[in-house]
């Protein structure tokens, strides 16, 4: 099955042949072999193009015979100090110079009182460089470089990763022994495929290296696995000897593989489906794809959750404030008519207060123009008209027109309120009328008061006299009687 959904690719390097497995996300898998010979990377690229497989990265799995795997006991150390100690201790266990060594290690579980224990994988530098060069020729980027048999636990179901297990996987003339404790790798060995009795002896020696008295199960897979599962010698070492508990999808894929290549194809498939962060990775750090550890993912998830909770609190407060503002707006709209009525009453009250103050100020004043104007209206003849009228505490002054201006002097002299009536300017003729300007003083040094109205109460005046007011001008003609 061909898939364009970023398939997983694994390349197993063993003997003089490459076994390639490409597993798509839809469950399909393709396995094919590529002879090493000359320019194997170019051959691999041609094979991928022929099968219309679009790959960007691939995991590379080495044969167990190309690597050295050791469990080392070290004093407690951390960081660069631990790396230096591993490199120093590993020099005694590899058959090549230290400068040509490429290694990686992972801690093994232990007790607080026991020495620090690590599992180390090492190989020659030229092996790593050859694998990288092969990928470069095929225009693929490396995703990981591991020992292929270390990726076999990826193919197991979740329920089959309990207890102490020795997994014997046969590929051609070699058997890879993978030791697992609750699904975690503790050691691996490569032994010759020399028969059932020899394999039982190798398993027993491996248990002694690990310090295990026995194991819960022995799993057998790969080439010619059926005769080994029926071996009485293996059955004497463990409670059960059986095939590994594959997942349903893996079991279906393995049934489609032909027997001559099932051992290598299984390792290639395990390499393709291996972890993005394998515990033992021989790929240089600067070439590894950027991935996130479990701790980083947990931290990122915690930060994201905190941000979401913060946004939720902010949005909840904003929504609460919006609802409160909406309720307040509704209450204001309901009170709007009452507020407008109160404002109208307040405006009317203010206007009436201003009118009352004006009336009171007029009543408290010493100059009362209305009684004087009433008296002038009674004294002046019908043909006399007033144009201006002004009065103060000393007297009054009027201007206007009359048929005979000189007759106005005696009329005003007879007034009980006025005295010293005289013209202040020459009389001039304007048509059939004479223009005059007359000035008079008060007889009692004060203007007359208005006659009291029947039934009205007198308004008490303040004890102190009010300040003098400017003369009041009343323009307009006043007809005389």
Image: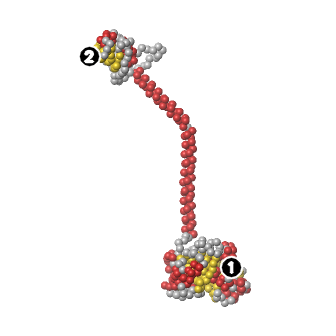
Disc 1 and disc 2 in contact, CB within 8 angstroms: no
Q: Percent position (x, y) of residue 260? A: 66, 85
- Asked if residue 399 can be seen in this view, the reply is yes
Q: Quadrant of residue 146?
A: bottom right
Residue found 37% across the figure and 12% down from its top: 382
Q: Percent position (x, y) of residue 449? A: 39, 15
Residue found 60% across the figure and 75% down from its top: 8
The residue where tag 2 is placed is 426
Which one is in front in this view, the residue at disc 1 or the one at disc 2?
A: 2
In the picture as drawn, the residue positioned furthest to the left comes out as 426
Residue 396 in the image: above or below residue 349: above
Q: Percent position (x, y) of residue 109? A: 60, 76
Classify mark 1: residues with Cα within 10 Å, few (<14), some (14-19) or many (20+).
few
Q: Which residue is more in the foreground, 312 or 471? A: 471
Q: Tag 2 or tag 1, which sits nearer the N-term?
A: 1
Identify the secondary structure beneath mark 2: loop
Spatial CA span between label 1 and label 2: 143 Å
Q: Which residue is more in the foreground, 351 or 232? A: 351
- Asked if residue 188 can be seen in this view, the reply is no
Q: Quadrant of residue 458?
A: top left
The residue where tag 1 is placed is 256
Q: Percent position (x, y) of residue 451? A: 42, 14
Residue 397 in the image: above or below residue 284: above
Residue found 60% across the figure and 74% down from its top: 7
Q: Quadrant of residue 471?
A: top left
What's the coloring here?
secondary structure
In the picture as drawn, the residue positioned furthest to the bottom comes out as 194
Count every numbered label the image shows and give the total: 2
Residue found 54% across the figure and 37% down from its top: 336
Q: Which residue is more in the foreground, 256 or 246? A: 256
């Amino acid at each position: 099955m061909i898939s364009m959904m970023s398939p997983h690719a694994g390349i197993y390097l063993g003997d003089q042949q490459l076994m390639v497995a490409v597993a798509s996300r839809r469950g399909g898998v393709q396995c094919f072999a590529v002879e090493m010979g000359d320019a194997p990377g170019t051959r691999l690229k041609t094979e991928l193009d022929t099968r219309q497989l679009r790959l960007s990265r691939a995991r590379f799995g080495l044969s167990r015979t190309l690597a050295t795997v050791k469990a080392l006991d070290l004093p407690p150390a951390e960081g660069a100090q631990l790396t230096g100690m591993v490199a120093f201790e590993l020099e005694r266990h590899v058959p090549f110079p230290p400068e040509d060594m490429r290694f990686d290690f992972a801690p093994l579980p232990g007790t607080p009182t026991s020495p620090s224990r690590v599992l180390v994988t090492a190989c020659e530098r030229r092996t790593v460089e050859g694998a990288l060069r092969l990928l470069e020729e095929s225009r693929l980027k490396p995703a990981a470089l591991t020992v292929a048999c270390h990726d076999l636990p990826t193919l197991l179901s979740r329920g089959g990763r309990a207890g102490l297990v020795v997994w014997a996987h046969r590929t051609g003339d070699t058997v890879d022994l993978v030791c697992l404790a609750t699904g975690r790798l503790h050691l691996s060995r490569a032994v010759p495929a020399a028969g059932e009795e020899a394999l039982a002896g190798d398993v027993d020696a491996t248990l002694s290296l690990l310090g295990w008295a026995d194991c819960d199960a022995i799993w057998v897979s790969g080439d010619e696995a059926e005769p080994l599962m029926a071996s009485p010698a293996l059955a004497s070492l463990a409670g059960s000897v059986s095939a590994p508990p594959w997942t349903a999808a893996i079991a279906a894929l393995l049934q489609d593989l032909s027997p001559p290549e099932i051992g290598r194809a299984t390792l290639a498939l395990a390499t393709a489906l291996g972890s993005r962060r394998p515990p033992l990775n021989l790929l240089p750090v600067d070439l590894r794809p950027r991935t996130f550890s479990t701790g980083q993912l947990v931290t990122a998830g915690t930060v994201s959750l905190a941000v979401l909770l913060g946004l939720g609190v902010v949005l909840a407060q904003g929504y609460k404030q919006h609802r409160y503002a909406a309720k307040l707006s509704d209450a204001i709209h309901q009170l709007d008519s009452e507020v407008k009525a109160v404002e109208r009453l307040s405006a009317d009250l203010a206007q009436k207060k201003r009118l009352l103050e004006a009336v009171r100020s007029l009543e408290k004043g010493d100059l009362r123009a209305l009684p004087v104007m009433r008296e002038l209206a009674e004294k002046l003849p019908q043909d006399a008209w007033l144009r201006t009228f002004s009065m103060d505490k000393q007297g009054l002054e009027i201007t206007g027109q009359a048929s005979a201006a000189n007759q106005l002097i005696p009329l005003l002299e007879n007034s009980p309120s006025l005295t010293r009536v005289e013209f202040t300017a020459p009389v001039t003729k304007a048509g059939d009328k004479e223009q005059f300007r007359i000035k008079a003083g008060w007889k009692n040094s004060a203007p007359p008061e208005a006659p009291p109205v029947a039934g009205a109460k007198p308004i008490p005046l303040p004890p102190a006299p009010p300040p003098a007011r400017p003369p009041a001008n009343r323009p307009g003609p006043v007809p005389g009687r």
